[in-house]
């Protein structure tokens, strides 16, 4: 694999043998698209579906099936049939680089193209626009996470009732911060595009509090101390302390993010938290604003969550933060493009300038990390600040990435010895891609 250190780092391609990109393009995408066809099929069986909806649903299934075959046969990537401005951008990229095919294209571009094309298939229909082809999966996996949800709600309730602030020692405050951050971090381990067929036992063993704390040694770049120092510095406390969380997945991860946001507010570390969601279904499990409301409604449901002792008060508490405008939800079309965040200042100057004003911008998950780092094949010891280019050094932005490693890019390791040890413990660079390792990477923008 070719590795360079300059900012024109080469992004990983689906044709790069032995990469996650290659495996994803060859094996995982067709399965994900087949699951979409099945989901539409299930919806078609409802007795309330009209004849017109039936016809259109079948046409959608066939458009998805065509795409599945194109992936399998390594067909050329063709312009998406839609007039939306963000789709035109995809088309312009294809014009600039003709002959990209599914199995020979930059991974980030091709994967985002896939989900954007799916969106257009539904959005240009009459009866299925607004349909969330991943909703069934998102909801059912969240309900399966019941044990961990109850455990985390109970844990949060006990800290919240005790008070998180004044009487606690510095050590206790740091420990709580470290725990809450790690819960939000490992919440990212169970995204559905990678792990849709997890058994209940597997899911639960990844989500329990103890397994989360045990996983500390698996954080290969861990800047928790630096983040804590920043949060306690005069620089941080001089400002408004408004924090942005760029969300990743719905379901259990979103629940951990809401708890993390509540913790930031209740501990006084933040005065407001803005949650940034996607505008349409994305990468199977990603959260839209409607998923946030949907998750709170699911928690309300006593059939799925019969043990109410902790859930009720935590839910009421979250709703109170929302009502008081301390917990705010926003979305942007930019999160569903294929642009790396190197392009953010140019493509979304307003959003970028909002983030510049933020006290801390927390990017959740693997895909945001890939976009921050251009999905680049950086040497693993490249400093995070360097790999995120314009969002790093001298940007003034305070960027924190909480990401379990599920791709080919990983930076911020301290030495080649560390890389070698990881390679020994986890051959074939499994630590970069199997979701069992993670990073807590911080750039102070200086
Ligand atoms: O390869 C795993 C994968 O599906 C990647 O394609 C993508 O980067 C990622 O998972 C999505 O994960 P996350 O939900 O953490 O962004
Ligand atoms: Mg995701």
Image (tube, helix red, strand yellow):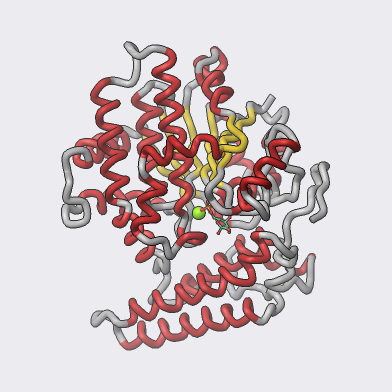
Q: Position of residue 344 (x, y in %)?
A: 65, 45
- In percent of width and height, residue 446 lies at 69, 24
- Quarter residue 70 falls in: bottom right
**Of 304 and 235, which appears nearest the observer?**
304
Q: Which residue is drawn at 32% across and 61% down?
A: 140
Could you say which is closer to the camera, residue 309 or residue 263? 309
What's the residue at 51%, 68% (across, down)? 119
- Residue, x 48% and y 49% (percent of image)? 189
Q: Report whether 196 appears left or right of 317.
A: right
In the displayed structure, does residue 64 sit left or right of residue 382? left
Residue 219 picture quarter? top right
Image mark count: 0
Residue 396 located left or right of residue 58: right
Residue 397: image quadrant is: top right
In the figure, 209 relative to 171: above or below? below
Measured from the top left, where is residue 93 in percent x and y?
Answer: 73, 63
Taking the image as drawn, is residue 130 in sight? no
| Residue 33 vertical position relative to residue 365 in the rendered view, above or below | below
Picture coordinates of residue 174 (x, y %)? 45, 21
- Closer-to-camera residue (385/95): 385
User: Hey, which residue is sitting farthest front in the picture?
Assistant: 424
- Is 143 rendered above or below residue 29? above
Quadrant that contains the N terminus: bottom right
Q: In the picture shown, does residue 138 fall above or below 372?
A: below
């Amino acid at each position: 694999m070719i590795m360079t250190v300059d900012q024109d780092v080469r992004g990983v391609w689906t044709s790069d043998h032995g990469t996650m990109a290659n495996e994803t393009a060859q094996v995982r995408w067709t399965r994900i698209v087949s699951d979409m066809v099945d989901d539409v099929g299930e919806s078609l069986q409802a007795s309330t579906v009209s004849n017109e909806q039936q016809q259109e649903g079948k046409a959608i299934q066939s458009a998805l099936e065509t795409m599945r075959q194109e992936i399998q046969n390594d067909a050329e990537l063709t312009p998406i049939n839609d007039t939306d401005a963000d789709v035109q951008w995809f088309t312009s990229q294809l014009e600039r680089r003709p002959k990209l095919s599914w199995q020979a294209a930059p991974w980030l571009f091709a994967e985002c193209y896939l989900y954007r094309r799916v969106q257009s298939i539904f959005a240009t229909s009459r009866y299925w626009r607004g349909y969330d082809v991943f909703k069934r999966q998102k909801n059912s996996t969240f309900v399966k996470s019941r044990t961990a949800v109850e455990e985390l709600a109970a844990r949060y309730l006990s800290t919240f009732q005790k008070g998180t602030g004044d009487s606690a020692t510095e050590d206790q405050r740091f420990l709580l911060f470290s725990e809450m951050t790690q819960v939000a971090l490992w919440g990212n381990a169970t995204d559905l595009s990678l792990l849709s067929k997890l058994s209940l036992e597997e899911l639960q063993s990844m989500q329990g509090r103890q397994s989360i704390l045990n996983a500390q040694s698996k954080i290969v770049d861990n800047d928790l101390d630096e983040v804590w120092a920043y949060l306690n510095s005069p620089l941080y406390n001089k400002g408004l302390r408004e924090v942005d969380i760029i969300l990743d997945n719905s379901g259990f991860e979103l629940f951990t993010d809401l708890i993390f946001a509540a913790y930031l507010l209740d501990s006084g570390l933040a005065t407001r938290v803005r949650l940034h969601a996607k505008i349409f279904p994305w990468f199977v499990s990603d959260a839209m604003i409607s998923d946030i409301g949907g998750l709170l409604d699911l928690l309300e449901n006593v059939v799925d969550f019969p043990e109410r002792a902790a859930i009720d008060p935590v839910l009421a508490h979250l709703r109170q933060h929302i009502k008081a405008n301390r917990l705010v939800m926003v979305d942007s079309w930019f999160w569903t493009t294929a642009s790396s965040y190197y392009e953010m200042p140019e493509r979304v100057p307003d959003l970028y300038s909002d983030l510049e004003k933020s006290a801390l911008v927390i990017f959740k998950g693997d895909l945001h990390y890939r976009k921050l780092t251009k999905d680049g094949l950086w040497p693993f010891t490249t400093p995070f600040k360097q790999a995120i280019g314009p969002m790093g050094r001298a940007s003034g932005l305070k960027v924190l990435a909480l990401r379990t490693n599920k791709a080919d890019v990983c930076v911020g390791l301290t030495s080649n010895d560390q890389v070698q040890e990881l390679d020994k413990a986890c051959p074939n660079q499994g630590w970069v891609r199997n979701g069992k390792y993670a990073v807590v990477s911080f750039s102070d923008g200086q």
